[in-house]
Amino acid sequence: MDPLAQAFQEEMAKFREQLDARRVPVSCALVALMAHGGPQGQLLGADGQEVQPEVLVQELSRCGALVGRPKIFLLQACRGGHRDAGMGPTALPWFWRWLRAPPATPSQADVIQIYADVQGSFPRGPIPGSSDQADILMVYAAAEGCVAYRDEKGSDFIQTLVEVLRADPRRDLLELMTEVGRELKTLRLRTGWSAADLSGEGTSAVGCPSCLG
């Protein structure tokens, strides 16, 4: 499906209405958005028009069935034109120690440090016009200003996420997302690929979770 820009919001509105019409409680909502992206993080429709991810988040935030429930957005899209060339093995000693011997449960220090390296991907402040920004998690396939890689086999970000969820779906969400980031980093080490070897939107270089609200 290659929706027009307007169709993104229309489909999200339909999804919200379907959830509100359910007679049984909704535990959470997970939305995966895969598209080409603009230089400021916009999603591009098949017609070349733009839609801001925040608009889609706002639409789902108005869902009565999801009040107090987790709302998770996965975004596989470029957020700019820069290519993340990665980092050398001596750049961040703590990071490579963490990769070689990761703890069963990541410590707060691990998570904070990882997030600090991609802090540019964190939205700042509330989304204008939204009345409820609690319980929202946005997970990006690329840091702010960077391309989101994928190849002819698909997105490593999405595929790795699916594998991690299937392997142990009962784990804490933060642990799962941290594991996704770890797997993506070790995938790069095993395969030896670099961003310079790929063109367009290809394999995800960095999984960047960020919380709103």
Image (cartoon, rainbow, N blue to C red):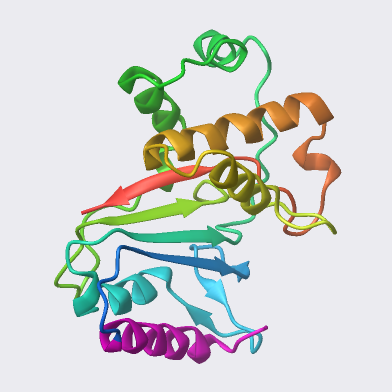
Give the residues in magenta.
Answer: 1-21
The correct choice, above or below, for 48 with respect to 186 in the image is below
Q: Is residue 9 above or below residue 140?
A: below
Residue 73's image quarter?
A: bottom left
**116, above or below 119, in the image:** above
Q: Is residue 8 magenta?
A: yes
Q: Quick check: 47 left or right of 211? A: right
Task: Decide if residue 40 is on the left or right side of residue 174.
Answer: right
The structure residue drawn at horizontal position 61% and vertical position 59%, both measured from the top left corner, is 78
The percent coordinates of residue 96 (x first, y second) are 59, 13
Residue 110: percent from the left, percent from the top? 40, 20
Q: Residue at x 31, y 79 (%)?
A: 59
Residue 71 vs residue 76, the one in the foreground: 71
- Residue that sits furthest to the front in the current view: 24
Q: Quadrant of the C terminus?
A: bottom left
- Residue found 40% across the figure and 22% down from its top: 106
Q: Is residue 15 above or below residue 200?
A: below
The quadrant of the rendering that contains the N terminus is bottom right
On whether residue 165 falls in the magenta region, the answer is: no
Residue placed at 53% from the left, 32% from the top?
179
> Magenta stretch mostly in which secondary structure?
helix
The residue lying toward the viewer, choosing from 149 and 68, is 68
Q: Quadrant of residue 193?
A: top right
Instruction: Using residue 68 as the reference point, say whether residue 138 is left or right of it.
Output: right
Could you say where residue 16 lies in the image, as x and y percent from the top left?
33, 83
Left or right: 53 as drawn, with respect to 21: right
